[in-house]
Amino acid sequence: METQETGIENFDERESLRVITEMIAVSRKKLRHDGILFIVWGWALFYSSFSGYLKEEILFSNLQYKLFHYMEYFLMIFVFGFTLWYLFRKDRKTSTYIGLSLRWVWFSAFFCMVLINLIQANVVHKINFELQHPIFMVVIAFAVVVSGVILRYGFMIGMGILFGLLAYAGSFFELHTQMLAESVAWFFGFILPGHILFARKTKEA
């Protein structure tokens, strides 16, 4: 009787491990398809940060400043619209538990950034952007690392750690230099992983 129970327990453990492994594999495959989201968000946020740095370092005309702002607004509207279309165009049956967990990680990160602004405005009665940017970067870095841990994806974990280190490095400088550090972080944290994931998806197709 004991031998039979032990066999059942071993079977259950092996079966559970197999199911978990398959779930991670499916989520990784889905993440490769979702690499396009890393690309569009990465380039849009890279543009926003790097253009902010350039506007402080280079003297532009009023028309050029307006073009920078209009392009930034256009990119943000496009990225939000594309993300909503991409997330809801698929049937819910294709969603995995891990995929939903990742989605909530990023929703929570966004909600935390909103709360940080509200708390800062409530305590110091203004938004200190030199403090805001590094903290926001730390929140994003945390979300990237957690996503990598959930998926057991070492490259993503490494990029999340780099994102956090760039946030700390940027805290030593003024806002416009922080924008440069932030643009570098978006490139290594989002754009590079996004293109790698998308390239793998293309090879699989």
Image: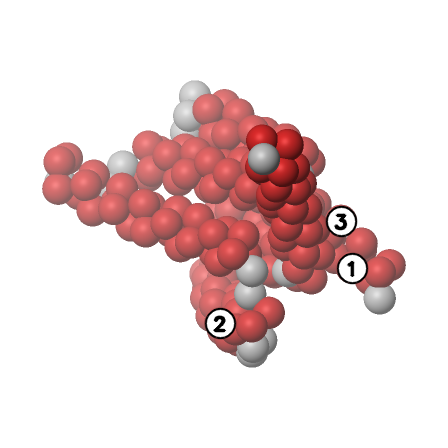
Residue 52 at x, y percent in the picture:
48, 47
Residues packed near mark 3 inside 10 Å, few (<14), some (14 to 19) or many (20 plus): some
Mark 3, secondary structure of its residue: helix
Residues packed near mark 2 inside 10 Å, few (<14), some (14 to 19) or many (20 plus): few
Q: Which mark is residue 196?
A: 3
Q: CA distance from mark 3 to mark 1?
A: 9 Å
Q: Amino acid at mark 1?
A: Lys
Along the line of sight, the residue nearer the viewer: 17 or 24: 17
Q: For the point 61% across and 41% down, which residue is it? A: 8
Quarter that holds the C terminus = bottom right
On screen, residue 32 above or below 151:
below
Q: CA distance from mark 3 to mark 2?
A: 23 Å
Q: Amino acid at mark 2?
A: Leu
Q: Mark 3 or 1 closer to N-term?
A: 3
The residue tagged 2 is 84
The residue tagged 1 is 201
- Extreme-front residue of the structure: 1
Q: For the point 32% across and 51% down, which residue is it? A: 111
Query: Visible in this render: residue 5?
Result: yes
Check contact, mark 3 vs mark 1: CB within 8 A: no
